[in-house]
Image (cartoon, coloured by chain):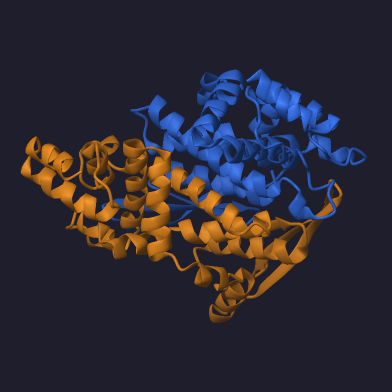
Chain colours: A orange, B blue
Amino acid sequence: MRRFIDRILKNSSSSDKQLLLQLEHLVGFTPKHIEYYRLALMHRSRPDDVTDSNERLEFLGDAILGAIIAEYLFKKYPYQPEGYLTELRSRIVRRETMNNVALRMGLNKLVQYNQNDRGLSRSHIFGNALEALIGAVYLDQGFAKTRTFILKQIIRAYIDLDTMESTDTNYKNQLLSWAQRSNKQLVFETVDERNEGTRKLFTVAVVIDGAQVATGTGFNKKEAGQVAARNAMEALGV
Amino acid sequence: MRRFIDRILKNSSSSDKQLLLQLEHLVGFTPKHIEYYRLALMHRSRPDDVTDSNERLEFLGDAILGAIIAEYLFKKYPYQPEGYLTELRSRIVRRETMNNVALRMGLNKLVQYNQNDRGLSRSHIFGNALEALIGAVYLDQGFAKTRTFILKQIIRAYIDLDTMESTDTNYKNQLLSWAQRSNKQLVFETVDERNEGTRKLFTVAVVIDGAQVATGTGFNKKEAGQVAARNAMEALGV
């Protein structure tokens, strides 16, 4: 393995060599095609042409990450219903979580971006770069090695599943306390009930100061209310 | 191969044998673990316990499908930006498309569901079963064979990418014509402009009869308006 790295290093520029060593440390193996990784680390604030940025790789990596986490949860929780798996996955792959993981991995030191733009380092560009890195690992190493990388270097290293499972995501409560703080009148209204197959499907609307802000649908009013509250928070930017 | 099938058949009940032959025809290979496929074909209207239905497998299959389509589009369109790939993928994996593919494959003849419930056969349960089937193929055969199955038996066989690419998804126009039909007053309002990094980020709201229904965010007003219109159509169930 060492000899393989030496051979690559011999044929590379000194900045390639440095990046290769940093990547090796970060991902736990020796990259074969360093150009994928270089692209993964390129934020769109740097290159002239946006297709030379990491956004396409982020699209790919996000999808691969979603599939691998889905399989992981499917096997880890054999008796949990689909809704539980979906919610838990969305907590793991959400922007805040991935950005936090990226920062703890030190990926922010490798990402190329316009450093004069102070706002960027406070946004989620490092989490996005982590997804792009996953895309690069996939193209470079294939599915099985990408799975190992994600499970070992991301999930086991940085994700506390117990905390994720117990985190409160009572969107209704969150929205209610926001309404109270903002001095707004908030009502949940059931606006539709119909049959979908053998089950009843409810639609609940969030009404703030008399105006309908969002709706949510579910197989019971509680679930529909939660979805409506989450949609309202998104619509309102809460 | 034939001998392998014969050996399975010898140890199976006659309903197993029939299903195995039907599946072989459908997926293009011989399943190893028929129990995954049996579960994939079980709609929640049949078993007593919902965890014995195909919903968990649908969660898994949906994620695997998303990843494989992402890779396919990433490689097929090397010069298209991320937004283009995202939109095209969402058209391929959307419920209507998958349900249509499932019907053309004849999957509806294999899905177990409550046939007394007339509404079910008009909903998307066959598309959902197709996703569950992808989950079963993945557990049974692994990633590489699942990719071949999806690209050969789904994409190349049933998806017309040229049509998908040219389909009009002008949500703003769709919402405007809905408002006209329903005799409602519809206005698009720019409610926020701020800087994200080096770029301006716009938030546009859909206001119907004076009430804000949804918002959308984008790097220009046109894009934000499209997102807002799509969110509004979802919120209103249009």
Q: For the image shown, how many numbered marks are present on the structure?
A: 0
Q: Nearer the viewer, residue B22 or A210?
A: B22
Q: Nearer the viewer, residue A132 or A190?
A: A132
Residue B120 x, y percent position in the rendering:
83, 40
Residue B8 x, y percent position in the rendering:
72, 30
Q: Residue at x 51, y 42 (%)?
A: B226
Residue B81 x, y percent position in the rendering:
36, 35
Q: Residue at x 46, y 47 (%)?
A: B224
Q: Residue at x 77, y 62 (%)?
A: A220
Residue A35 shown left or right of residue A65 in the figure: left
Q: Nearer the viewer, residue B234 or A104?
A: A104
Residue B195 x, y percent position in the rendering:
32, 57
**Image quadrant where residue B175 sits:** top right
Q: Residue at x 50, y 25 (%)?
A: B165
Name the quarter where the N terminus of chain A is drawn. top left
Q: Nearer the viewer, residue A95 or B211?
A: A95
Say above or below: A104 vs B31.
below
Say above or below: B142 vs B103.
below
Decide if residue B54 is in sight here: yes
Residue B176 shown left or right of residue A160 in the figure: right
**Image quadrant where residue B210 sits:** bottom right
Decide if residue B176 is in sight here: no
